[in-house]
Structures are given as C-alpha cells and as structure tokens.
Image (tube, helix red, strand yellow):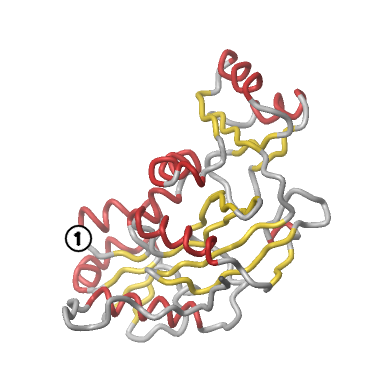
Amino acid sequence: MKLVSFDIFRTLGFPDTTNLKPEQFLAHKALLKEADWVLFPEYWQLNALVHGLKCRVFPSVASYRIGHDKVEMTRAFQAVAPEHTPWTLIEANGPHEQQAVWDAMALPFVAKLPKASMGEGVWLIENREHWRRYCEQTSVLYAQEYLPIDRDVRVVIVGDRVVSAYWRTQSDQGFYNNVSRGGRIDRGPVPSVVTDLALRLARELEVDHAGFDIALVEGFPYVLEFNRLFGNQGLARGDELKTAILDYLQRQAEPEDPDGPTGPAPLWPVAV
C-alpha cells in the first residue's frame, strides 16, 4: 500500500508511508491522488482531499464530521441508539432558552462546550451560579443528565474491531474520569455489553477510529462521547494500534472473498 500521512507521530513505523505537513498538501496533489490511503489529515483539509482530490482518507469522513462537534455527535447517538444516550437538551444560547433548560434539568447536571476534548469544556452544574458562568462561555447550550458513576470505560475501536477496553476511575478532584484530568486506568474485566455497544455505534455511524467513552449504570451502558484522536495511555502494547490500523487498511483495500471468513477475528478478549 502507498500511504501518505499528515501526522508523523500517529503513523510512526508505518511502511511505505510519505509524511507531509498539512499546509503543504496542495503542492503534492499528484502524490495524494496516487496514494491508496491518506492518513490523519487535519479537519480543515477534509473537503479538499475527499471531494477535490478524491482521496481515500483514514479515519473515515464520518469519524471526522461526527467527532468534530459534541452537538452533532449526540444527535447521531440519539438517531441510532436513543436508549443508550443520556437525556440531553441542546438549545441556542438565549435568555429564554437558558431559563427553559435550567427549569427542565434536575440538579446536578452536566454542561458541555460543543468542541472540547480531554475533559476540557465540561462542567458539573450544581447551582444557578455554575449555570450562569457556563452560559457566558458557550454559543450553544448543551445540558445532559448526571449519571451516578465513579468510572467509565474507554473502548478503542479500529475499523470493525475492539483494540482495547479499560476502565477509567475518577480523579482525586472528583467528577472527571479522563486520564488527562487525573483519572486512573483499571484493567479489570469489561462487560461485553459495553464493547458490543461501541462496536454497534461504530458500525452504524461508519466511525472507524475512535475511543468511545461508555458509562455503566446498574449494568446498562450509556454512551457519553467518542474521541477521534484519543490518547494511547491505556493501550497494553505500543504496537497494537499500528498493527490494527494497517490490518484494517489492507482489508479495506482488498476485494472481499465470498468464500472467506465471515468476519475478522477479535483483537481483544471481552468479559461476558
């Protein structure tokens, strides 16, 4: 396979890969057109690469467009798995809407900025002052029910496989489970109901590279969000993500064998 990468760190060690800086991409149009895959472009490059140069990109277009905005992401979850999506209100940020959302939500509840990651842009709203400060910092109101959890699961998906799944326990400051905010990794067994939900969402939304964050409440899974560009702190081996990506790209590039296996073998053992 001929590969072109715009993220040298995420494709370190990939064979037959040309690394380019994103701002240089229009100077290499012939190279990009000839590539089997263009890997990890910036979001702002997507339309030019996919629609202009007809490149095949990884992660998928859906991974970029759905993962770029929590509002769009939540609406996608509500479309395909409403029963697994926490109750969420999304409104324009105006005085009437602020009051209506405040009146509708039970305390405490969670408020988020549409575009943020690594636990940034997320508030636990416990009183009216918290709500006022949040409203001053966002153009769109995003309010979500608070789930009574002290941990969640990060499920890493590449293509149609679970590469890794692990618990993230709450940080010392409380509320946040993100490793970047002080959460801790727990490699205890992850129930299959969690990984099954992540795989279902990835398949139905055509997301092929993501870290899904899923909460378990009395045995029932709720999807919180996914990150297209996730950290690798929880991966057990340094090369497992590279191996999974290359295997997926190769399988996608080859025509399907009608007499071959019905599906890929799992990469990660799941608790039942």
Q: Where 142 sits versus 118, above or below? A: above
Residue 108, percent across and down?
Answer: 73, 33
Can residue 78 be spotted in the picture? yes
Choose between 206 and 147: the one closer to the eye.
147
**Quadrant hosting residue 209:** bottom left
Choose between 41 and 121: the one closer to the eye.
121
Q: Is residue 97 left or right of residue 65?
A: right
Residue 217, percent across and down?
Answer: 65, 50
**Which residue is label 1 attached to?**
54
User: Residue at coordinates 78% horizontally, 57% vertically from top-left?
Assistant: 171
Residue 164, percent across and down?
Answer: 54, 73
User: Residue at coordinates 62% horizontally, 53% vertically from top-left?
Assistant: 215
Residue 166, percent across and down?
Answer: 62, 69
**Quadrant hosting residue 103:** top right
The crowding category of the residue bearing disc 1, from other C-alpha atoms within 10 Å (few below 14, some 14 to 19, many at least 20), is few
Q: Is residue 22 left or right of residue 47?
A: right
